[in-house]
Amino acid sequence: MKNITLVISYLVFFFIQCTAQENIIFRTQNEHPDELATIKMLEKLLADYDITKWIFTQEIIIDKDAIPHSHPVLTLHTRYLRDKSGELGLLSTFIHEQIHWHLVEKDADTDAAIETLRKKYKNVPAGGSEGGRNEHSTYLHLIVCSLEYSGMEEMTSKTKAQEVMEGKTYYTWIYKTIIKDKKYLQKLIKKHHLEIK
């Protein structure tokens, strides 16, 4: 009986996993070959990694001219076809933008965590390659990027996750900080109920 229960539990988990990942709808903005190739790369990532717990929105646009963003529709670009981080860079960016959707659902907890971060990090960069577009965005991205780092560690390895984070050419101060202060940020995320389960 115990074996039957385990098999049923596994099948239910597998069905939920497949359903979440199979329900993702990819669209291109321009039908450009690079956009179509990026969709193929994403489909391979969905087959290779269980990213179910990081999926908060199913509609994804690939736009070769866009800067990746989460809202109103999660949009990714095509740079990872030529970037040295390749598939892992795309995976990292994909879950990064998904995490924004998770934090929108937990806006009060996110705001409370940001207030705590303001006390810990009094002078943060805004704009340029080091920080977010403004001070608030930098604080928010300390949470987003910390969750992204944890997700990449869980799906790949500590070494590969750190390589991807260190290879980023944007949010450079943020990525350095989330590596340096990993334990502090993980505790903060847990305290404010922002972890992804």
Image (tube, grey):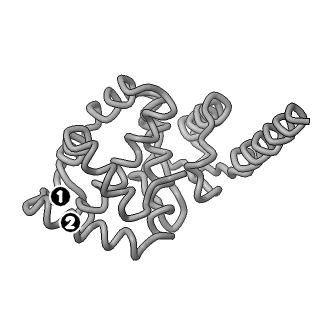
Q: Residue at x 60, y 32 (%)?
A: 49
Query: Tag 2: Cα neighbours inside 10 Å, few (<14), some, or many (≥20)?
Result: few
Whether residue 170 is visible to the viewer of this picture, yes or no, is: no
Q: Amino acid at mark 2?
A: Asn
Q: Amino acid at mark 1?
A: Gly
- Whether residues under marks 2 and 1 lie with C-beta atoms below 8 angstroms apart, the answer is yes
Q: Residue at x 22, y 67 (%)?
A: 116
Q: Residue at x 59, y 41 (%)?
A: 51
Q: Is residue 176 above or below residue 159?
A: below
Q: What label does residue 127 carry, if any?
A: 1
Q: What label does residue 173 carry, if any?
A: none
Percent of width and height locating residue 123: 7, 60
Secondary structure beneath dot 1 equals: loop
Residue 120 falls left or right of residue 91? left
Q: Which residue is mark 2?
A: 134
Comparing 167 with 158, the one in front is: 158
Percent of width and height locating residue 47: 68, 31
Marked residue nearer the N-terminal end (2 or 1): 1
